[in-house]
Image: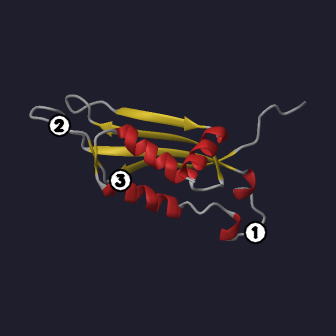
């Protein structure tokens, strides 16, 4: 019996509440209480399946999380799309990241309910283009 499942490794961040201001709201508009980020990074299996307990053998995600926080706090943004774009560019700075999924959402949307978000999925070729554009 053969195993058809492809081996892959991810680093996953879920439900991170960002200190970000996004959008322009008038009287009577629903102003979101929070913006949350889900981030999935595909990395080489060798960065997770390690034979020794050493930080040099894994992907150090702490600097990336700090950069995402800096992006969130930097300014008042008009759109979630811009924030997602900046997060994608921050991720592209790390060669260890092979592909990614970003999901940024706000809540509530209407009458204290609902979530509305923007999702971006980039494969290796997409990240290579981002890296080239940032060079």
Q: Which residue does the image show at 57% across and 50% down from the upper left?
A: 92
Q: Which residue does the image show at 41% across and 34% down from the upper left?
A: 118
Residue 7: image location, x then y, percent:
76, 42
Up/down of 70 relative to 76, above or below: below
User: In which quadrant of the rendered image does the C terminus lie?
Assistant: bottom right
Residue 67: image location, x then y, percent:
45, 59
Left or right: 75 in relation to 120: left
Q: Quadrant of residue 69?
A: bottom left
* Structural distance between the alpha carbons of marks 1 and 3: 35 Å
Residue 48: image location, x then y, percent:
69, 56
Up/down of 1 relative to 83, above or below: above
Q: Which of disc 2 and disc 3 is earlier in sequence?
A: 2
* Structural distance between the alpha carbons of marks 2 and 1: 52 Å
> For numbered disc 1, what is the local secondary structure?
loop
Left or right: 106 in relation to 85: left
* Structural distance between the alpha carbons of marks 3 and 2: 18 Å
Residue position for label 3: 72
> For numbered disc 2, what is the local secondary structure?
loop
Left or right: 43 in relation to 12: right
Residue position for label 2: 25
Contact between labelled residues 2 and 3, with CB atoms less than 8 Å apart: no
């Amino acid at each position: 019996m053969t195993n058809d499942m492809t081996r892959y490794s991810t680093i996953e961040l879920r439900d991170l509440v960002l200190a970000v201001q996004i959008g322009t709201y008038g009287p009577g508009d629903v102003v979101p209480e929070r913006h949350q980020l889900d981030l999935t990074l595909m990395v080489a299996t060798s960065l997770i399946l390690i034979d020794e307990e050493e930080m040099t053998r894994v992907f150090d995600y702490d600097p990336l999380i700090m950069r995402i926080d800096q992006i969130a706090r930097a300014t008042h943004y008009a759109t979630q799309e811009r924030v997602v774009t900046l997060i994608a560019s921050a991720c592209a700075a790390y060669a260890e990241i092979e592909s990614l999924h970003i999901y940024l959402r706000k809540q509530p949307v209407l009458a204290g309910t609902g979530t509305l978000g923007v999702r971006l999925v980039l494969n290796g070729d997409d990240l290579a283009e981002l890296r080239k554009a940032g060079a």
